[in-house]
Amino acid sequence: MLQNKHDNGNIKLVRYQNGNLISPLVQDILTTGLAGTTCVLTKTNDEALQITGLLLKNGIQAKLIQSNDGFSLQNLLEVRFLLNEINIGDDIKIISDEVWANAKSKMRKKFQQSSKLEVCNNLIKQFEDSNSKKKYKSDLEVFVRESKLEDFYNENGETIFVSTIHKAKGKEFDNVFIMLENFNPATDETKRQLYVAMTRAKRNLTIHLNGNYLDNLTTENLELISDREEHLPPQQLAMHLSFKDVWLDYFINRQHLISQLTSGDSLTINGDECTNAKGQSVLKFSKQFLNTIESVKQKGYHLKEAKVNFIVYWKKEDAENESKIILPELYFERRR
């Protein structure tokens, strides 16, 4: 399972009789003495979000590995700003050191409060590392077009990274916690996912699951734990909204207000919309998402808080100009 090591790592399996594995998994992380790099892997984005939120609430430095599913990286506000600063005419093929330094400096100054600045800085560094002598505009455009947001997260020992199994491919960590709630490895695809997840671990692998498909696992340094308790759903839920969750046309006449916002800014929820600090409406939820809010309410949660997650350029079909749109991050709390 841990093929590239000569000594065997440690494997712990925690098998549950019931669901709601998020809280006990987080409790396990809090009580385990961790050294080196750590990652938590889940099936879904929603699960990864909940775990990140709960770790942060418990004072643990945690970071969700996000993806730009649904939009191209060149349409992310911060990246577009950098590309616009560099675009000095079609006849110029090579980016001069002066233009490059100037564009970086302007981007960092303008977005110093943005929650996406670190990712942008890592994008810049990776491009510089592979293009140290000459920087061609065409190479930068291809680099941005072919990259994904999850390529630009720095692994370190202080931060626990939380990711879906899909986004962790190619990365390795000293400690890996995998949550497999209602996971069914019946197909070749799900078996492959399980293999990918397990082989991310270099030293310690912990799997929290409520299925019996690993019951016959036998290997050295294996610890088996049975948990028969009934665990409650998490107190807080977080959601990252996509294009289908917001009313896109509504943003077209809100461009001047969106220009005053940056990723990470707080928004106020007011019924079917979100407002800025001055109480001005900057986004409306789609009808589809209002149904989602209603179904989450039925489970005992109320919508409590909103933040700007991404600001992205979007072009309506047949429209002349692009519009900036907000994809927010929402927090729900369970009524006690």
Image (tube, rainbow, N blue to C red):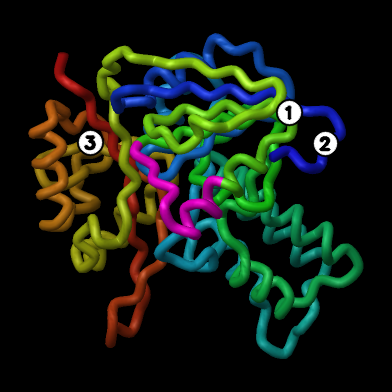
Residue drawn at point x = 25 percent, y = 61 percent: 244
Between residue 55 and residue 201, name the one nearer to us: 201
Q: Amino acid at mark 2?
A: Lys
Mark nearer the N terminus (2 vs 3): 2
Residue 274: x %, y % from top left = 21, 44
Between residue 191 and residue 123, name the one nearer to us: 191
Label 1 sits on residue: 203
Residue drawn at point x = 58 percent, y = 43 percent: 197
> How packed is label 2: few (under 14 Cα within 10 Å), some, or many (20 or more)?
few
Q: Is residue 41 left or right of residue 20?
A: right
Between residue 254 and residue 17, name the one nearer to us: 17
> How packed is label 3: few (under 14 Cα within 10 Å), some, or many (20 or more)?
some
Label 3 sits on residue: 268
Residue drawn at point x = 10 percent, y = 49 percent: 291
> How packed is label 1: few (under 14 Cα within 10 Å), some, or many (20 or more)?
some
* Mark whose residue sits in front, 3 or 1: 1
Mark nearer the N terminus (1 vs 2): 2
Mark nearer the N terminus (3 vs 1): 1
Find the residue positioned furthest to the bottom: 91
Q: Amino acid at mark 3?
A: Thr
Q: Are marks 1 and 2 in contact (CB under 8 Å)?
A: yes
> SS class of the residue under badge 1?
strand
Start-end of magenta stretch: 182-194
Cα–Cα span, label 3 and label 1: 44 Å
Residue 312: x %, y % from top left = 41, 61
